[in-house]
Amino acid sequence: MILPRALTESLNAKLLMILMVVALFSSMTIAAMFTVYELNAVTKAEQSKLNSIAKILAPTLTASLIFQDEVSASESLESLLGQSNIVSATIKDNDGNLFVGVSTKKNNEVKIFNKLMVSHTPLIMKGVRHGLLSITADYSVIERSLLFFSLFLLAILALILLLSFILSLFLRKSLIYPLTHLAHVAERVTKTNNYNLRSKVLTSDEVGNLASCFNSMLETIKQRDNSLEETVQQRTNALEIANNQLTTQAFSDPLSGLPNRRYILDKLATLVNRSETHEFALLGLDLDGFKEINDTMGHDFGDLLLIEVSNCITNILDESAILARLGGDEFLILVEGAVGKAALSSLSNTINQQLTKGFLIQGKHVFVTTSIGIAIFPEDGRTVENLVKYADLAMYKSKEAGRNSHHFFEQCMLDAVIQKHQLVEDLRHSLENDQFELYYQPIVNLLTNKMCKAEALIRWNHPERGLVPPIEFIAIAEEVGLILEMGEWVARRAARDLAEFKRLGAADDFQISINVSPVQFKGDGQWMLDWFKYTESLGLQRDSIIIEITENLLMESEDSIRSQLTKLKKRGVAIAIDDFGVGYSSLSYLQKMDVDVLKIDKSFVDELENEKNSRELCQVIIMMAHHLDIQVVAEGIENAAQKQILTAAGCEFGQGYLFSKPLPIDTFKRQYFIHSSPIDLSLI
């Protein structure tokens, strides 16, 4: 009760002090008034007493004065000195001469008033004044009387103060108790937060009004508190519902209702942290060809397909397995326990078998397969990140193997990724470090055995790995976007080399062919305009460089690709179709693009001696090309028999190891321009 005690003690002290000060001030005021009154009364009495004594002695002393009886007068005056307060007495005649005078020296103990009282009485006989009697007295009697009166007053004052103190204590208690009670109730409310408590209204004065207001305030607080508690409870319930919804949304896929990436990763983290001996397997699934279905049929159709696939796989799995959707068409299956590779293979096959049955969506039958990659804990990895990554690597291996299959993770897959990553990093620095060079392979006129063209083939001189063939880095360069810069380098370097060949005596119709990646045709074509300016600065004819493209690029429907191919033709640049026969081109595309050269793929040339179909197909291609006024180059000629068959079929040009392997530029210049000579097949 620290606060109430401090409050009441402060009020008690103040109230007691006020009451006592009032009582003391009142008592002292009254005492002062009585003292003044008593002083005046005693003084008047003493003065009257002196006057009475003088009047009594006046006749006798008048006679003594008339008869000049000094002895009798002195005796009469001496008798006055017996009075305690009379200090002197004198008789003077009318002229003021002293007739008789007496006096005494007294040392009274009380000396409050340092003054004297005098009584003057005329001495008259038969109406005639004969002199003056003067009696002088001090204030000793008055002082003693006043002292006694003061002691009496002090006693009365002490009694009054005592009674006032007792009365003040009573009044204080009666006045302070209601406040004390109110403070006590306030303290209990503060400590207990119980707003049902109420203070008693003990008086009808301001304190009682304060208690009533305090009770009203408690009632208001109680109502507001109840309302607040109700509101808080409602909001708590709403927040709990919202939190549950958010949790559901945070851990489930909104489309399929399956657990999402966050849920499955948290689950995997729990399993990994539980024990390294607790085995489980991860199956990473990716739908084959889903992008084509999504782009062709629409995203809504694709979403319905994802839902059907989710339901199908869920029905296959038992309760111990969890299917989660990572996003897009990627799924992850968690199978707990030591299942074994045979069981996992069986599960993967079952999934693909069920999916290949197809789905009926919006009245259309859709067939889909999956590529599955499997990683096992702890055999393949001991962290969530690695396990998911390894399952992903195995899944991509399934896609590379033809899709609709499954593969288990193997270390060689990771090694290949690491090697690819390192290759990408090396590729990024290869151009600035001048690590590329062009090799040239002659293209020979099959009738004259003379070189009339050459194909520029890029080679990478890796500082550690040595000469890296294009098959190992071209696809990667296309994937990471380096092919654009690399392709521009090839085009410029080939033009520069061609200018050098011309200077060394190359024929006016000598041509160099360069391979252009499809990626280069998907931009704005600025590289082409810059290249045109560069070839013009070298004084080259535009048809002296042949652009080799693939069949698939010829069939691309993108406007930018068609526009750039058209620009090349209008500028007089020759266009060759590389690896013809292995793609999906048609005669209509050959006619539309006005192709200059067809290069028969090496796979047909390899079978010329043994496969009749290959010979007939080559003959058809050659005849078709001649009908369209298109030159034909046979790739991969390795022996004279192949050359003879192709020559008999009407093929004009050939390229292959029979004539020459790709050569570094210095060797190529020395062999064909500095010491030029026809290719002697008898030496092969």
Image (tube, rainbow, N blue to C red):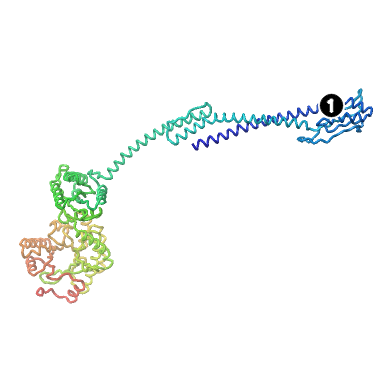
State the residue at coordinates (57%, 29%): 170
What residue does disc 1 label? 53
Which residue is situated farthest in the right direction here? 67
Residue 268 as seen in the image, left or right of residue 583: right
Q: Is residue 466 above or below residue 197?
A: below
Q: How many marks?
A: 1
Residue 89 as seen in the image, left or right of residue 441: right
Q: Is residue 247 above or below residue 137?
A: below
Expressed as whole percent of the image width and height from the top left, the position of residue 482 reads 25, 61
Q: Is residue 677 visible?
A: yes
Q: Is residue 334 above or below residue 217?
A: below
Image quadrant in which you'd find residue 66 = top right
Q: Nearer the viewer, residue 387 or 678?
A: 387
Expressed as whole percent of the image width and height from the top left, the position of residue 627 reads 10, 61
Q: Callout 1 environment at 10 Å: few (<14), some (14 to 19), or many (20+)?
A: some
State the residue at coordinates (48%, 30%): 213
Q: Nearer the viewer, residue 289 or 231?
A: 231
Which residue is situated farthest in the top direction here? 126
Q: Nearer the viewer, residue 163 or 640?
A: 163
Q: Is residue 440 above or below residue 125?
A: below
Expressed as whole percent of the image width and height from the top left, the position of residue 102 reads 87, 33
Q: Nearer the viewer, residue 77 or 536?
A: 77
Expressed as whole percent of the image width and height from the top left, the position of residue 147 reads 73, 32
Q: Amino acid at mark 1?
A: Ile
